Amino acid sequence: MANMAQAIRMALHYGEQNLGVTEIFGEDVGPPLGGVFTATQGLEKTWNAPLDERGIIGAALGLAWAGGRPVAEIQFVDYIFNVIDMLKLAANGHWSSGGRYKTPMVVMTPTGSGIHGSMYHSHSFDSIASKLHGMKVVCPSTPIDAYGLMIAAIKSDDPVLFLKPKALLRSKGEELIPGEPDEKTLHEMIDAPLGDRTKWKAKWPKLSDYTVEIGKAKISQAGTDATIVTHGRMAPICLDVARRFQKEGKGSLEVIDLRSLIPYDWEAIKASVKKTGRIVFINEETEITNFAEHLIRRLVDECFYELKVRPRLLAGKATPGIGLSPNLEYFIQPQTKDVERVVSELLADPA
Amino acid sequence: MANMAQAIRMALHYGEQNLGVTEIFGEDVGPPLGGVFTATQGLEKTWNAPLDERGIIGAALGLAWAGGRPVAEIQFVDYIFNVIDMLKLAANGHWSSGGRYKTPMVVMTPTGSGIHGSMYHSHSFDSIASKLHGMKVVCPSTPIDAYGLMIAAIKSDDPVLFLKPKALLRSKGEELIPGEPDEKTLHEMIDAPLGDRTKWKAKWPKLSDYTVEIGKAKISQAGTDATIVTHGRMAPICLDVARRFQKEGKGSLEVIDLRSLIPYDWEAIKASVKKTGRIVFINEETEITNFAEHLIRRLVDECFYELKVRPRLLAGKATPGIGLSPNLEYFIQPQTKDVERVVSELLADPA
Amino acid sequence: MPTKAAAKAAPASDLYKKLGATKLLKIHELMVRARLLEERLIKMSKGGDGFFWIGGPGEEAFNVPLGLQVKKGHGVNFDFLHLHYRSAAIVMAMGAEPINALRQMRSVATDPYSKGRNFVNHYAIPEHNVVPVSPTIETQYSTAIGTGIAQARAKTDAITIVNGGDAGTAEGDFHSCLVWANRPILPLPILIIVVNNGYGISTEMRTQHGEKNISDWAKVFPDMPGKTINGNDVIETWAALEEAFAYIRKNRKPYLLEAKCSRLYGHSSSSGANRIPEADCIELLEKNMITRGMAKAADFKKTWDTEAAALDAAHKQVKSEPFPAVESVWEDVFADGLPPSYPTKGGS
Amino acid sequence: MPTKAAAKAAPASDLYKKLGATKLLKIHELMVRARLLEERLIKMSKGGDGFFWIGGPGEEAFNVPLGLQVKKGHGVNFDFLHLHYRSAAIVMAMGAEPINALRQMRSVATDPYSKGRNFVNHYAIPEHNVVPVSPTIETQYSTAIGTGIAQARAKTDAITIVNGGDAGTAEGDFHSCLVWANRPILPLPILIIVVNNGYGISTEMRTQHGEKNISDWAKVFPDMPGKTINGNDVIETWAALEEAFAYIRKNRKPYLLEAKCSRLYGHSSSSGANRIPEADCIELLEKNMITRGMAKAADFKKTWDTEAAALDAAHKQVKSEPFPAVESVWEDVFADGLPPSYPTKGGS
Ligand SMILES: Cc1ncc(C[n+]2csc(CCOP(=O)(O)OP(=O)(O)O)c2C)c(N)n1
Ligand SMILES: Cc1ncc(C[n+]2csc(CCOP(=O)(O)OP(=O)(O)O)c2C)c(N)n1
Ligand SMILES: [Mg+2]
Ligand SMILES: [Mg+2]
């Protein structure tokens, strides 16, 4: 089973071999490191940028205007906040130029908490990302979706922000990526060796053009009693809770993994609510002006009378940062027990 | 009647004379211009900064740490997006240092549309501002509130983002600022003359310590049938519509002018909803992940069963920018007729 | 290849001859076209025939020679231009139609640069590699890195050109451009231009900047030439640009060029957009050509009249054109169209 | 006042004498304290007694003399320090207690710098004007502007000190610091330090930076001295810092100082935090003092042992201390307390 970092690497390999990706760059993205989470090891078109996020996004934008399909990395989303203006230029350039300039670029960046990252390796970015109108925003929770969404992002003529949940980059999925060999073989083929790598070259499995359409959610578990809408780090946790509830007969939960935030799969959410009448939105960003609050507002607009009980939100607490001490991180950021609690309340809420 | 730019100028004068404000700076803030909207004309402590938003916010932060009470300006909020990281440092420094460093600084910046500003003189910033946890955010809609909130912002030991609605900076209010002389006199005293200003010095009226508490909304019209929660450019429009509805017997509208976004006056909103059971939130920012959607979500959490009808939002359309042609701006940004429409629907909605 | 010290230009007289009357008259015509265009735009902004004006009257002696020396076309084998809002004379010299600037000023539906969405002089011309002009100061120095990389990789003599103002060099993007253009592992063929008019809106350059010349930033990089020139003198600008273009096309390395120009109508309509008593590069060119017997006052008058007449016609035409339809705001949000479920109501 | 060219240091031998054994032994003791602290922190990060480690082992020969020359205190009449995550030896030399760094490493409630919230070596010491260390690279060069302005206004000889790494100089904040520190209207008394260890994480400086020395950025500003020194040699760093401090205190103008130092345990725990075969400044100092008969191996051994013992005791103490209470997250959100209606549920 490939982990998410390997899946992204394979998608980028497919991209540089078949989809015209000519530049994959960012801080420590090239050899010897191949990315702080190994997501760019062994690729052909990778290189190390100066320590300058503004130059990195500027370079990506210029490369896209020059007809390329660049993939740029911001090392951690925590360090993207000095270049929001350039992301806006990438997002609004097609509109401001009256449709004359396309901006096919991918910006990938690790997001979220879960690695004891303290204040600056734990940020989420969904809400601000959702306001960079013209930018597409995706956030996979499994290796197969990471692969398919990266292929889709590379093919897109719009700028795509590809959020990589930090906590899931080393986690494996349940579905195989088309062409993926067994775990050990894959490791020997594409993971850079420890120590000297100067002579190492990756061997790549035969990969295929597997695309996950941007804007399509995944029903990771079908259910009838209540709906969970989630993505990223919280998705596997929600799925795990839903499965246990199912097994233990506590209720039949439908789990929607958004995968794409912009555009988002509104039809999938509406359809599920029409079925269950009960819904909770779960993500790890702080609760003030949270992207899911937009979805709740729209739900209230369009499905107020289909809702059996009030729609809920489980999100991060609005502290100025995420504390390093596990006591603090686990209190600030939603954990499994919080999901169990809110889902139980949702199911128990008298209609 | 002072206009809002004059009110801010008077508050800054009071601040530099009585509240320990030693530096008021930004691009073109000092002589000869005194600010692109004249809000810093004739003051003692103003100076022009290099064209560098990062240096400006960095300077403010350093000055605050050094024991000062700086007031820095970002010339237009449209140009704040290259320095969000530094605003976050200002906001989280008190928390990250375990409470050992306070950050008494004010960042003021013109916000919103309404001056035919096209793509980069029309931005709103409420939503992102509301996620800079640790930062207080205010946005007055009248000269008297601008005066009182600026005094409060200067006194605050927290960083305060002071949003100045572009479209209202030249508009006058209904209430006099304590100590304010008649309009003509005020103009002769504190407005810089056209042409050569090298010899000009402002004469200041005797001003007083009038404070509007940060976090307190204003009920600009009391009403019983429905509630409008608004702020900034939309506030006077909403008040005007509410008064006309009153006069024409179309309904009794309560208008809440938030004035502070962070912290916001939750008690005022709840109290009003308990009374009216009908509520609409009106602001000019784009509708995806809009600050008011947080308020709606919280309302659904805490007052679901007090709501007679679904809560509503009237906001800007989620285009990549605001178009220059009035056709486009008036379609993208909420206007008086949109307020009338949504309020009528709100009142007519069968409970 | 130039020394790093600003080279002294050869005696102007020769250079006038060298350039020749035909070329100089062509340059003059384009300068007049750009100047009249800007003055018309100002008039429109004051006459309610548009709103905000910002532009580059006073920079024609630098911008026209620049535009004429551009390797014009589409794609990496042609020059890329990352311009700012004072670049009308550059695109005019590259063949842009004044009428399209009038369309953007009036923000009519036919505005080819932004469909009536953006301020005037915010060009976006893919056929000629003019990337979207951004209202954000200095970001063009960061995007220039990207087209520069594309051209450093390609087998071509094409280069990237970026221009902006003096005050903007305080922004980090100017630094990013310097650092990235000089990366030992991949130097970039970028003509880094700073037009120094002595002001950022109301703020004097000399109060804010300790560097003697902006071109002194080149001193940090052993390999990058830096030069400061008088941007009001067509002869000096033509020669300096020729030298800079030749150096970059050949060596595939950056060159920093500072041009001192007049800001003839102040900053923008926000500062009144009235004529300022500063050196006028067109007057200067006319005077110099006449004293050298290369042209007569009458020739110049004819150019002014012809260009003015053409502009009148264009303006008349534009006034007859419709404003954009409100639904057009939903065009170009995404390259592949608006998803059916994208929220479009602006709330409930 | 120094010439802009890096002045040659006087023959080292004299300088050893000049500094004297007592002072050198004091410096050595602080270097050992800082080194042992970092090695302990690394051990803790590997032993599950904390998480991420980042720090400055290898920079002691520069950081200890720096800390000792600081005018230490609170407020504008004392030096302000805008440090980064490799500055432990600086604060140790200023008298900070190693135990507090252990507390931050273990993120216990007693961590005086962040209450268990931030990574280790992220100091915040108001009593000594050490402003909060930010995890964001280079932003300290922008905040330094502010304390620099406060000190430029005050009647004082106090200055602002900012340090950071080589790779970080690619960020615009470095540019902002250079530009603002050299404003003709208000030059700033800032010691702008760059510690050049040749790397940004895994990326080699020489692949990304075309400037021969980082101190060459001073060439842009006629008034700002720039110098590059060997940061591994206490003698050279002491003298260079004395010169720089004296210049800034007296002239109230900026000074750019580049120190080349070793990165003895690599970038951080993310790169393994294992010992790298680079020059060790403590070994070097010991060797030089012994050959000059200024100290014996035994003296040094004693220092190592004493410091190690003290650290053991401190570590033992810290292990007995509680972790922060969950409710403590609501402290320090706002200076005047959390408003009663602030949302604290994390959703519904
Ligand atoms: C990032 C940013 N900050 C501020 C502004 C507002 N602004 C527009 S033009 C200008 C002055 C620019 O001066 P300079 O760089 O010298 O160019 P000039 O206008 O003189 O040609 C400013 C501050 C902006 N457009 N973008
Ligand atoms: C703005 C920002 N971008 C990226 C990072 C991630 N990061 C942490 S340390 C580092 C390398 C810094 O290198 P250098 O400036 O040379 O300092 P050194 O670590 O070598 O002392 C990077 C890229 C960060 N912390 N902040
Ligand atoms: Mg200028
Ligand atoms: Mg380094």
Image: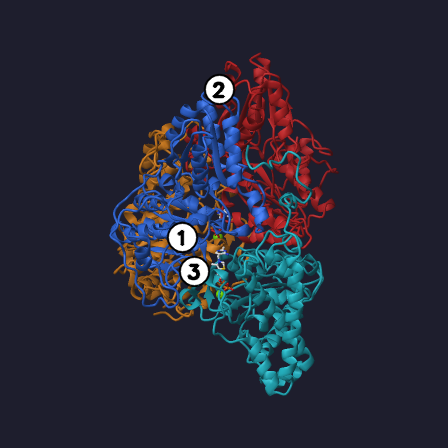
Chain colours: A red, B blue, C cyan, D orange
Look at discs 2 and 3 and give the one toward the viewer. 3
Question: Tag 1, which chain?
Answer: B
Which residue is at the front of the view, A218 or B41? Answer: B41
Any mark on residue A341, and which?
2
Q: CA distance from mark 1 to mark 3?
A: 12 Å
In this picture, residue D300 sits left or right of residue A31:
left
In this picture, residue B196 sits left or right of residue C114:
left
Is residue D296 among the parts visible in the rendering? no
Q: Under tag 2, what secondary structure?
A: helix
Any mark on residue B50, and which?
3
Extreme residue toward the front, this view? B248
Q: Is residue A47 above or below residue A190?
A: below
Q: Amino acid at mark 2?
A: Arg
Q: Under tag 1, what secondary structure?
A: strand
Which residue is at the front of the view, C60 or D44? Answer: C60
Q: Amino acid at mark 3?
A: Pro
Question: Tag 3, which chain?
Answer: B
How far across and how far down the image is residue D41, in percent? 41, 40
Q: Residues within 10 Å of mark 3 (few under 14, many from 20)?
A: many
Q: Under tag 3, what secondary structure?
A: loop
Quadrant hosting residue D317: top left
- Identify residue for label 1: B73
Is residue C151 among the parts visible in the rendering? yes
Q: Residues within 10 Å of mark 1 (few under 14, many from 20)?
A: many
Residue depicted at x 66% and y 50%:
A99
Q: Please say if the residues under marks 1 and 3 sit with CB atoms less than 8 Å apart.
A: no
